[in-house]
Amino acid sequence: MRREIPLFLTILFGCLMVIKFFVPHPWVAVLGERLEGWTIIVAAAAVVLGVANVARIHARKIARREPEHGFSYPLLFGLALMIILGMTPASWWVALGAPAGGVAEGSPFDFFYNRAYVPMQGTMFSLLAFFIASAAFRAFRIRKLEAALLAITAVLVMIGRVPIGAAISPTIHLPGSAESQPLLTWLQDWIMNVPNLAAKRAILIGAALGAIATGLKIILGIERSAIGGD
């Protein structure tokens, strides 16, 4: 029953949510809204379980003195600090002289979020730029026609997006318009808005079809890995 009940509920609710988009009936809309409300509650419970699991794993790592357990101290401290700051009643912070409380703008929670989390997140993304540059260097080794097209297109887009691209390229008059634009700027706009956008839409359509196929397999019970099956 541990597998049959989740599978039955998945099939039932999955079919109801599909019917909601094709049957314009009031009771179907009400039922769909109720299910969406339940989804929010279940997602919140899943977040709580996820936080508890992260705390348990890192507490065990500290207790066992596992390698690199020192990184678990700031993680648990930051986790506990943000939970306390976010759940403390706003009136308490206002009474202590803070501009606001809870998660509002100007609250201690907002201060640590914007002064600690956001800068660290920006630092991580900045570090990723070096790895992306390294991967791009390896990918741009021209051995085939496809690699040559990739390298040429990437160089044109990168140069066309920076001011030096507009400075070194001649100005052209756009057909059917009185406006003029640097050649490299126009070329990178065309690459991004025509072939790139067409390929992007094709990938999104393929991903959507794959998601639909996976959803149907789960609803019909063909794919059971989500509920512990093979």
Image (cartoon, helix red, strand yellow):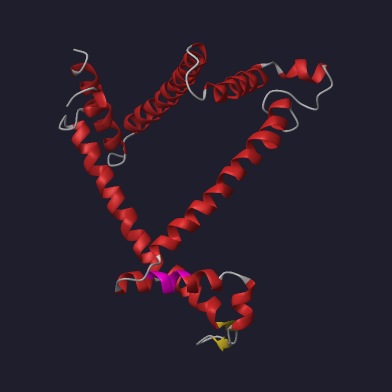
When the figure is inspected, residue 100 is found, relative to residue 174, above or below; the finding is above
Q: Decide if residue 165 is in sight here.
A: yes
Name the residue nearer the viewer: 16 or 134: 134
The residue segment tinted magenta is: 150-154
Please tell me how many numbered marks the rendered image carries. Answer: 0
Quadrant where the C terminus is found in the figure: top left
Residue at 51 percent across and 87 percent down: it is: 176
Lateral position of residue 172 relative to residue 228, left or right: right
When the figure is inspected, residue 190 is found, relative to residue 219, above or below; the finding is below
Residue at 23 percent across and 22 percent down: it is: 228
Q: Residue 126: x, y in percent?
A: 58, 49
Residue at 16 percent across and 29 percent down: it is: 221
When the figure is inspected, residue 139 is found, relative to residue 165, above or below; the finding is above
When the figure is inspected, residue 92 is found, relative to residue 106, above or below; the finding is above
Q: Residue 205: x, y in percent?
A: 30, 54
Lateral position of residue 101 relative to residue 223, left or right: right
